[in-house]
């Protein structure tokens, strides 16, 4: 999923990109409104994070022009302006959400995931073939379009990348999936591999999807190779 980050402050832009790429999104960066519009036309992003106070063309005008191009692409305004009128104007222009600086990483992630869920649900409603089918791993049901998993009544939030990891392991059930394959499929072929990055991601994912992360049954380690999902044996009817 592609996200356009339009923000003139370099540090804020870099921070947002790092958070989004850690979640599994592909990002494109714009430092002003004109560049944001050019990138939007060129890369056709699935979601736009848009600052208000930008040079050349401000965020309000960018949003107006984006809505003339597409009524469905989600837009999240991100701005240092905090007055209620700014929020109202942004939403009236067609923004899907509004974040005010300073904001925390968890808040950004939660808002992005929420908008992503709404976007995927709308896609599935317009084109049922676009919906990603749920799948089961042991006692865990993974719901890709919701960026969630369920174990009984317990709901577990997931990132795009975490869903991709679980899907890959599920599709290769019983087989050892090597690290290069995990990186190529779940991070992209342009990503420079780092064993620490993969192991940390798996460790965090285990904490949420395993009943006991110290003795995992969904994501097991294959030493010297990578990871594997071994489906439980069917019950013996004898």
Image (spheres, helix red, strand yellow):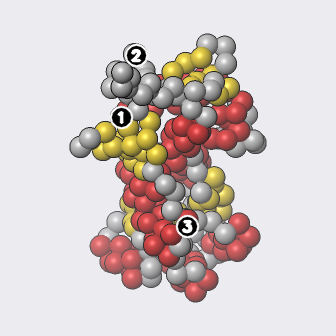
In primary-sequence order, the first of circles 1 and 2 is 1
From this view, report whether residue 47 is shown above or below residue 182: below
Mark linked to residue 139: 1
Whole-percent x and y of residue 198?
Answer: 59, 28
Q: Residues within 10 Å of mark 2 (few under 14, many from 20)?
A: few
Residue occupying the point 55% across, 18% down: 221
Label 1: how many Cα within 10 Å (few below 14, some 14–19, many 20+): some
Is residue 81 depicted above or below 66 in this figure?
above
Residue 231, image x, y percentages: 48, 29
In the rendered structure, which disc, 3 or 1, sits on the residue that comes first in sequence?
3
| Picture coordinates of residue 226, whole percent (x, y) | 63, 22
- Residue at the (55%, 65%) spot, across then down: 130
2 vs 3, front mark:
3
Seen in the picture, residue 163 relative to 222 is either above or below; the reply is: below
Q: Picture coordinates of residue 107 (x, y %)?
A: 37, 50
- Residue at the limit of the structure toward the top, as seen here: 223
Q: CA distance from mark 1 to mark 2?
A: 15 Å
- Rounded to the nearest angstrom, the CA distance separating label 3 from label 1 is 26 Å
Residue at 39% across, 43% down: 141
With 58 as the anchor, is 156 left or right in this view? left
SS under mark 3:
helix
Question: In 3D space, how far apart are the residues under numbered discs 2 and 3 (Cα atoms)?
Answer: 37 Å
Q: Contact, CB < 8 Å: mark 3 with mark 1?
A: no
**Foreground residue among 234 and 159:** 234
- Total numbered labels placed on residues in the image: 3
Residue situated in front as seen by the camera: 20 or 90: 20
Q: Which of the labelled discs sits on residue 215, or is there none?
A: 2
Image quadrant holding the C terminus, namely: top left
Asked if the residue under mark 3 is in contact with the one under mark 2, i.e. CB atoms within 8 Å, the reply is: no
Q: Which residue is mark 3?
A: 129
Q: Is residue 112 visible?
A: no
Give the residue drawn at x 42%, y 28%: 234
């Amino acid at each position: 999923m592609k996200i356009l980050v339009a923000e003139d402050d370099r540090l804020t832009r870099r921070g947002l990109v790092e958070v989004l790429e850690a979640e599994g999104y592909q990002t494109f960066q714009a430092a002003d409104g004109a560049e944001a519009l050019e990138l939007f036309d060129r890369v056709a992003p699935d979601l736009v994070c848009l600052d208000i106070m930008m040079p050349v063309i401000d965020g309000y005008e960018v949003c107006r022009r984006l809505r003339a191009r597409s009524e469905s692409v989600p837009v999240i305004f991100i701005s240092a302006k905090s007055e209620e009128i700014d929020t109202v104007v942004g939403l009236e222009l067609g923004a899907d959400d509004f974040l005010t600086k300073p904001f925390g990483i968890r808040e950004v992630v939660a808002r992005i995931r929420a908008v992503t869920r709404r976007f995927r649900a709308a896609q599935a409603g317009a084109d049922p073939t676009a919906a990603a089918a749920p799948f089961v791993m042991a006692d865990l049901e993974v719901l890709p379009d919701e960026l969630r998993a369920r174990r009984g009544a317990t709901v577990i939030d997931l990132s795009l990348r975490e869903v991709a990891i679980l899907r890959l392991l599920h599709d290769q059930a019983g087989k050892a999936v090597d690290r290069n394959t995990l990186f190529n499929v779940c991070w992209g072929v342009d990503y420079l591999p780092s064993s620490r990055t993969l192991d940390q991601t798996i460790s965090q994912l285990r904490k949420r999807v395993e009943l006991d992360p110290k003795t995992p049954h969904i994501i097991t380690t294959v030493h010297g190779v990578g990871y594997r999902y071994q489906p439980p044996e069917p019950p013996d009817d004898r």
